[in-house]
Image: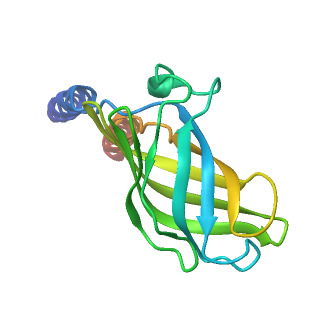
Amino acid sequence: MKLIKSLVAGLTAIVVASGLAVSAHATLITGMLNIAGTANYDKPIGSATMITLFENTHVEQGANTGDFASIAANTPVTMIAPYIFNPSTPNPMLWSVAGFTFNLLSTTIVFQSSDGIILTGSGIISGNGFDPTPGEWSFSQQKGSGTRLSFSGTTEALPAPDGGMTLALLGAGLVGVVAFRAKFAKV
């Protein structure tokens, strides 16, 4: 009888926790946003450490997905400079467009030479009534050398967490193990 009460109490706790996990699920941003424009660097691209000015920055046509899909091509994007990538420096509100913003937390230089640059970074996407969502930033110079070059950038919302269901299932498994052990400990 004691075992049954323990099992019922444990299962009740799991059901309540599962219900709270589902009801507390956030509305996160989904999808990918592609932008392009011109970047002015502090030095020639091979030794540059920052972008001092962004020009003609706009939403690219086509590959935008999820919550960014409805943003029209050529919509102007506001980008904040300087963008210091070496050393990695946070850039609050790196870009904003159509009610969305991206706060860059860190940057990694993937490749840099006199032929080009590729940067990646992580940050938080927010706006338009969604919960702040982790995102990944990718940036690459398209052509040329010198200090004024065209670029493309992509920001992608990272996959949403499972809302606590994994924890609830783990708890259910542990309750089962405890019940199994209690039953056979008396034998």
Residue found 80% across the figure and 66% down from its top: 145
Relative to the observer, which residue lies in front, 62 or 18?
62
Residue 18, position as x, y percentages in the image: 26, 29
Side of 102 relative to 175 (left or right): right
- Tell which residue pokes out farthest to the top in this image: 70
Residue found 56% across the figure and 25% down from its top: 73
Side of 125 relative to 34 (left or right): left
Residue 7, position as x, y percentages in the image: 23, 31
Residue 114, position as x, y percentages in the image: 83, 72
Side of 170 relative to 7 (left or right): right
Side of 178 relative to 49 (left or right): left
Specify the color scheme.
rainbow
- Tell which residue pokes out farthest to the right in this image: 115
Residue 140, position as x, y percentages in the image: 70, 54
Where is 171 relative to 136, above or below? above
Residue found 81% across the figure and 72% down from its top: 113
Relative to the observer, which residue lies in front, 186 or 55?
55
Where is 125 relative to 32, above or below? below
Relative to the observer, which residue lies in front, 20 or 180?
20
Q: Quadrant of residue 161?
A: top left
Query: Which quarter of the rendered picture does the N terminus lie within?
Result: top left
Q: Quadrant of residue 42?
A: bottom right
